[in-house]
Amino acid sequence: MYSRIRIKELRPINLEGGYLIDGFPSVGFTSAIATESMIQTSQFSLAGIIDSDSFPPISLIKEGKPNYPTRIFVNDDLKVSVFCLTLLFMNHYIELLQRQCLVGQKNKK
């Protein structure tokens, strides 16, 4: 059984009337690479992380700093949020993550 998924906002996220992009990998890392490219070429900033005791104990090193492998980026001007996941999980777990992210945004209304 999977442990609880926690979404921690590092700053307020308001996406009412905006878009939520799923950057979770499905087959390979194509979506994760495309998501990372979009984040780097637009005005997205780190707004939160997704964590669980079920996640492997790893960290990504970017620009010399450790980062969570599951991150939430937001472009406030476009009202777009991107969930960036650089870990491969079973499809069932990805569905749980997606559902939790959507429920979290709906509950903020």
Image (cartoon, rainbow, N blue to C red):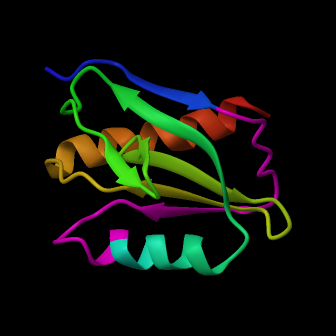
| Residue 79 position in % (x across, y down) | 79, 63
> Relative to 102, is 98 on the left or the right?
left
Quadrant including the N terminus: top left
Q: Is residue 2 above or below residue 99?
A: above
> Relative to 61, is 78 on the left or the right?
right
Q: Which residue lies furthest to the right in this view?
A: 77
Q: In this view, does 61 lie above or below 55?
A: below
Name the dominant secondary structure of the magenta segment: loop
Quadrant including the C terminus: top right
Is residue 64 at all visible to an observer of this figure? yes
Q: Does the magenta stretch include residue 84?
A: no
Q: Residue at x 61, y 55 (%)?
A: 73
> Relative to 100, is 92 on the left or the right?
left
Q: Residue furthest front?
A: 64
Q: Which residue is drawn at 52% across and 30% down?
A: 7
Magenta segment boundaries in residue numbering: 10-32
| Residue 4 position in % (x across, y down) | 34, 19
Front-most of residues 67 and 35 = 67
Q: In this view, does 57 lie above or below 91?
A: above
> Relative to 27, is 67 on the left or the right?
right
